[in-house]
Amino acid sequence: MDSYVSPIAPGRSYYQDTVERPRHPRLDQRVETDVLVVGGGFTGLSAAIHLARAGVDVTLVEAHRLGDGASGRNGGQMGTGQRIWPGEVEALYGFERSKALFDLAEEAKAHLFEFIAANGIDADLRMGQLSVVHKRSYVPEYRGQVEALKARYGYRSVAFMDAGETAERLGSRRYFGGIRDGGTGHVNPLKLLVGLAHVATASGARIFEETKILSTRRENGRTVAATARGEIRAERILYAVNAYGPGLDKAIDAHVMPIGSFIGATEPLPDSAGVLPGGEACDDSRFVVRYFRKSVDNRLLFGGREAYTSEAGDITRHIRKQIAEVYPHLKGVRLTHAWGGSVGITMQRLPFVRTLSPGVTTIGGFSGHGVMLANFAGRLYAERIVGNRDRLAEFEALDIPSFPGGSRLRAPLLFLAMTWFSLRDKI
């Protein structure tokens, strides 16, 4: 068993005990490349794969190990559409653009399903998603969302659940109704990431771990990125760092905020526990969302404590308390793993894509929706570079505002706001 512990995220994840994570070398040489990808998560690996398959010379560097960031430690849920409801996107950008973004997200979902199957990746893919209501007053809104998804967006894989059906499918009477989505699913994210890395190297991409970019400069029309023991000269750079890019560029710092999210894994549960008998994943209607699902070996993986500071505290205690609120009969259940990490969010909870300077692009801010969107965004970046088409422009055209408060007050203001929303969730 790999005893490695990530230096950038607390706790050891359950996923680390389910897959062997190969090591990649550190960079200790000078490299010439067409595209330098900074960040070894879903976005970066997907971009590397599709660039390499198109004949582009691509080099990927990860400051720590592949999977140390959110891509290897998240809840594994995909969802449908963008991170926020289609109606919320409509209010920001109108129906035509909302529909285009929804369709793009649906293509992202189909792409991921097809990629997993075509490349034989054992990612523990299971189908089904439940989005449930923790306040009775939210029930009409969720019923309306089902109607809108079917009538306005042509998405017919959803159905509204009353309180009885919700209790039956959850194995809990804590919620008042919700939406059942049979067109999406959930995965073991680290298994998916290891599979992506294997495909990337097999496609010809060079991958270096524990290789941090210390500085960049322009020289003879190329960007030179310096590392501790080498340098990389590239025509183009993709920053695919999401929540783990402080200091790389002021625009990334201003628009993508890291927040902490924490997950616990129980010991394997007996079938008699009655938890999620259909095997769906679940998220609830709290602003500070709770999300949970069962693993293939029948553990409950429960994420529910977002933290807007850098302190994880006692992850196990908080997660066990929240599990007991949803499943009282699991009070005192043993957690075999508890871990956390940072997720990159934006003010609108929509992706942040920006050309920072000639040849330098950043993609991130998936706001908890990255399993599906980050993988596809990497492919869209490759399409742009190869010149086939430029659907990445759909994301780049979004008017994502910066977080208020500047570099000094941004995090404290967000902490205050999230504390207020957390209190509102309880009222």
Image: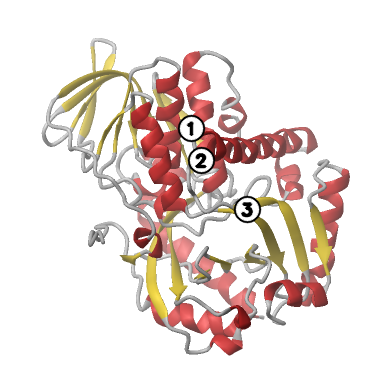
> Residue at image x 72%, y 77%?
175
> Residue at image x 41%, y 82%?
317
Amino acid beneath label 1: Gly
Any mark on residue 374, and which? 2
Q: CA distance from mark 2 to mark 1?
A: 6 Å
User: Which image quarter is the C terminus in?
Assistant: bottom right
The number of numbered badges drawn on the structure is 3
Amino acid beneath label 2: Ala
- Left or right, 298 with respect to 309, comes to right
338 or 241: nearer the viewer: 338
Q: CA distance from mark 1 to mark 3?
A: 20 Å
- Circle nearer the viewer, 1 or 3: 3
| Picture quadrant of residue 338 | bottom left
- Circle nearer the viewer, 3 or 2: 3
Q: Position of residue 182 (x, y in %)?
A: 73, 54
User: Which image quarter is the N terminus in?
Assistant: bottom left
Is residue 138 visible in the rendered image? The answer is yes
Amino acid beneath label 3: Gly
Q: Position of residue 14 (x, y in %)?
A: 39, 65
The residue wearing badge 1 is 378
Q: CA distance from mark 3 to mark 2?
A: 16 Å
